[in-house]
Amino acid sequence: MSLRDIETRFIHALSLHRRKKHRVHQDLTKAHELYQISTMSVLMEGLYDGHTTYEKLAEHGNFGLGTFNSLDGEMIAFDGSFYQILADGKARLVEPSMKTPFAVVIFFEPDIQLDLPNRMPWHEFEILLKQVAPSHLVFYAIRLEGTFEYIKLRNVTRQQEPYAPLGDIVKTFPVLELRHVKGTMVGFRCPDYSSGINVPGYHLHFLDEERETGGHVMTCTANGVRLQIDHTFNLRMEIPEMFVFDEQARRQPPGEGQRGTAGR
Ligand code: ZN
């Protein structure tokens, strides 16, 4: 596919979205928006307990990623199914009553689809993505499906209170390497200006074809993979109210006032 073809596809995709937007006015419940619980900077501070259930989250999207209360695993969602990937990389279906302190979801409607060349290392994939998804202003949802020659994953480990900031514990999370594995990669490319709110650049999670093993993607080499991309101009973000109580409690010296425990 030439660069010209790719640009034409992107322009076509933009016009499709304008038409979708027109439809949105008639049906607000289907608004094409990226829906986010909390922010990356709040998660980095160590606020690992939210009050949003996965049942509620699923009302805002069928595709995305995130984590669980107490950082008990990486979340990946696609085709309407939500999975929890534990520290050892083992996956299981999410119970609707489970809660999340950070998640990003969308109703995925890809407007660009193409097959990647064989043996495509991550740095080449990034170059291609810059052509297929050229805007620095919009949020892109990305799905990769097929065979991966190599994937390096990292998975969060369940934390005990008092929670340490994410930056202090990230190096303790186990790393997992997979070779010649089939599966699905799901995630987003967020603009640089979203720093603090989300992860600028790529954030992808992986789950194998058997729905048994996966995690947060650090790098990969694709080898026979189909790429699908959706994009949106709309971001809706909700900060869990209980985080404000947590924040106030942290600022108070010990013994002065009660720690907010709503929703625990
Ligand atoms: Zn992640």
Image: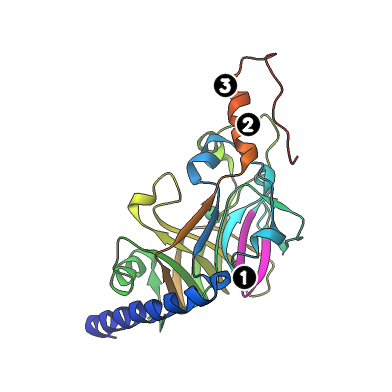
Few, some or many residues within 10 Å of mark 2 (<14, 14–19, 20+): some
Q: Mark 1 vs mark 2: which is more N-terminal? A: 1
Give residue 229's quadrant in the image.
bottom left
Which residue is pictured at 73% across the width and 33% down the height? 261
User: Helix, strand or loop at disc 2?
Assistant: helix
Query: Which residue is most to the front?
Result: 26
Residue that label 3 marks:
251
Q: Position of residue 85 (x, y in %)?
A: 66, 58
Left or right position of 188 against 85: left
Few, some or many residues within 10 Å of mark 3 (<14, 14–19, 20+): few
Label 3, label 1: how many angstroms apart (C-alpha)?
43 Å
The three-letter amino acid code for the residue at tag 2 is: Asp
The magenta region covers 74-83
Q: How many marks?
A: 3
Which residue is pictured at 67% across the width and 29% down the height? 162
Vertical arrangement, residue 237 with respect to residue 59, above or below: above
Question: Is residue 158 part of the magenta span, yes or no?
Answer: no
Tell me: is circle 3 under 8 Å from ligand 1: no
The three-letter amino acid code for the residue at tag 3 is: Arg
Residue that label 1 marks:
208
Q: Position of residue 161 (x, y in %)?
A: 70, 32
User: Helix, strand or loop at disc 1?
Assistant: strand
Which residue is pictured at 68% across the width and 54% down the height? 86
Residue that label 2 marks:
246
The three-letter amino acid code for the residue at tag 1 is: Asp
Mark 1 or mark 2: which is in front?
A: 2
**Residue 90 visible within the image:** no
Q: Quadrant of ligand 1?
A: bottom right
Label 2, label 3: how many angstroms apart (C-alpha)?
9 Å
Q: Mark 2 vs mark 3: which is more N-terminal? A: 2
Give whichever of 176, 53 is nearer the camera.
53
